[in-house]
Image: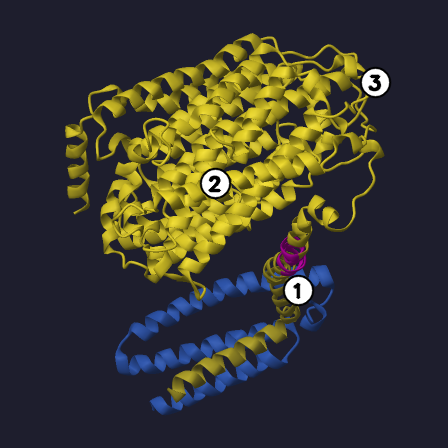
Amino acid sequence: MIAEALALSAALFVIGAIGVLTRRNAIIIFMCVELMLNAVNLSFIAFSKLYGFGGQAIVFFVMTVAAAEAAVGLAIIIAIFRHAQTVNLQNINILKG
Amino acid sequence: MLFATLQAAEVAAETHPLSGTFADLIWLVPILPLLGFVINGLIALTSVSTIGPRDPHAHHESHGSGQHGAGGEPHDDHGHAPARHRYAWLVSIVGPAVLWLSFAFAAGIFGALVGAHPEEPFVKRLFAWMITGDLAVDAALQVDQLSMTMTLVVTGVGALIHTFSVGYMRDDPGYPRYFAYLNLFVFFMLVLVLGANLPVVFVGWEGVGLCSYLLIGFWFEDKVNADAGKKAFVMNRIGDFGFLIAMLLLFANIGTLDFTGMRAGASQLVEGGALVTAICLFLFLGCTGKSAQIPLYTWLPDAMAGPTPVSALIHAATMVTAGVFLIARTSFLFALAPAASLTVAVIGGVTALFAATIGLKQWDIKKVLAYSTVSQLGYMFVGVGVGAYAAGLFHLVTHAFFKALLFLGSGSVIFAMHRAYHATHRHDDAQDMRNMGGLRQFMPYTFIVMWVATLAIAGIFPLSGFFSKDEILTSVFARRHESTLAEASWLGIPGSAVLTIVYALGLIAALLTAIYMTRMMLYTFHGPNRTGEAERPHLREAPWVMTAPLIVLAVLSAFGGWLNLPAVLPLGPVQLLHHWLEPVVGEPALHITHGAEAHLSHAAEYALIGVALAVAIGGIAIAWVRLKPEALVPKARAAESEGVERVLENKYYVDEIYDAAVVKPTVGISRNVLWKGLDAGIIDGLFVNGSAYLARAFGWLGARLQTGQVGTYAWVLFLGVLFVLGAVAVR
């Protein structure tokens, strides 16, 4: 049972990671990051079956942080869009050294 | 162990027969000139704003030292009243007075010393100077027969020269500064001769070097004079390096630098061993610098750029004899190192002859005397080199008398010459003998006392130089057999042969001394006057404040020989100085002659005296017959000399050789390798700018990584995580 849950978690995580690395749209990247977070949450839940409720407690923390991050992240994306009229990250390199 | 010896020394000092007597005031002797320095120095500081036109003497002296060419100076101070300082009268009192007081105290202590005549030196500890680890050095003064003899010479001759300076330097705008330096010099010289350990002596040694530098460059407005001072300073540093090394070697091997302690500890050293020879040679290197011996002698003739009384005091009578004093002081070491002693004697003999030949063809009256000084210093080193320490010191004392007299006499001549030129507003060389001649009629006192000194230095019986020079030559002759020196070898040559050569060198130098001194007198005082029609009426004798010291010195030069009469001549108490110095240098001297006084048969001694006298008279006769002052023309019209004369006139081109062989390479290496290569290239270029370039290059690389593309950063992060995970997994 736990093996399947972990396999699903890993698959979700890898999908999220590939999305983050390959996509250029900020929104999609953002969604992929959320996917990765939730993949991790899934593995926490799976492990809590073995090691007690600590894992579930951490999941709540992760969700809280993810919510806060979503709020801030989306606000930044909106600000970027207002500034550059695009959310394509290839066109945004104002932090170039 | 160290503290034990210190306590022992203290106990010894308390029970010393001199403690509680006048000798406890020994510190006053050097402190008085220091006080004079402070007073005159403060007065000199007030005169900064009142420095007026250039000094009148400086004008002509600068011509004498190299720039041969009459007139053409941009400054014209004629017609101005001399800018005499407001407090010059106070300086005139304080400057000489501290010396006379100091002399009086020294004489009192000398009296106490004569009364007690202790075998052990009296060491007056003033305060602990430096105590670090095993090294404990006190600021301590040593009263013994040697130091008090030197103190009397320094303060006595010094006081006379200070008095003379009152007249000579009267019109100089730097008058207070002059006396401040001169007082400071005497202070350091007294520290040098009275020091009870090598570091204290070294302080005096360096101090007199500093004052010598300050006084050579006293008229520093002329670059020649400033350069001469710098030259003296740099050449002395070479010698001082030797002094320092010797001091460190002594401390490392004996563990103390007090003279009493070293004397006791010298027995640990292997006689004739490499260590004691090295120590003595390094000490002697110091002496060659300070006392102007080959190879470091070239600064002394240039030092004549200073005021003439300075030449008399520092560069003839006192400072330059410090090397001879130092060897006598450390005679217990030199007696253990025959090879080093022979080196001293050979260098002394060669210098005596070499400098005498140069003296034969100099035209500047002070240059003649300068080379004569180098030559006579060579004589003293011959004396102390062969272990006749008392003889060397005897010559030191008599030389202080007659050479100070000669220099002050030449100062008196230059003073008169300058005054004559000044009166007619003419620019010419006041020191060139070709511009003098016939001064006998104008300066009778100077003429007489100069002849006394000349006969003394030439070695005419019964003047002082005869006895001192004769004793040195006799000592060399006597030590050819039955002495440690004769049995040692020097660079593979047997010691007795070396001593025979040194004796011959000394004899030839004596002949040349008689010749060049007579030449100087002939050209200066005899024959027709060549100064000029207009100047002639202005030539006259110097004021009394200048001639009086001359007369005192003339008496001393004439009768100084009675300090140490040879045993064979029944003229009075014999060998006073010799016996007087016995507690200090007697034992080392006896060590060299195997415990017995070096004895020659009376016939041999009479023969040697006869030879010496014949040489002296012969030299004077040769000069008198061969040289024709009537044939001389003034400097401005004189033709260039040729051949050997030219080589001698240019001092064997030694300065030029040193310049090409030492100075130019040193400057070249300094400029091209050390400055442009090492400093500008490696330190500034590689280290300072290089580190900046390196930081900038890394910055450039780092900036290339900052693409601004979030995707790139994500990839880097991803790969980094993979790398870390991989590393953890592999481990």
Separation (CA) of disc 1 from disc 2: 100 Å
Query: The disc labelled 3 sits on which kind of residue?
Result: Glu
Q: Nearer the viewer, mark 3 or mark 2?
A: 2
Separation (CA) of disc 1 from disc 3: 91 Å
Query: Mark 1 falls within which chain?
Result: A
Direction from residue B470 to residue A2 in the image, left or right? left
Chain depicted in blue: A
Q: Residue at x 66, y 76 (%)?
A: A24
Ranked by sequence position, the earlier of labels 3 and 2 is 3
Q: Position of residue B240 (x, y in %)?
A: 47, 46
Instruction: Give the residue at mark 3.
Output: B533
Instruction: Give the residue at mark 1.
Output: A97
Which numbered marker is on residue B610?
Answer: 2
Q: Secondary structure at mark 3?
A: loop
Q: Residue at x 18, y 26 (%)?
A: B17
Asked if the magenta segment contains residue B489, the reply would be no
Direction from residue A66 to residue B437 in the image, left or right? right
How many residues crowd mark 1 within 10 Å: few (<14), some (14–19), many (20+)? few
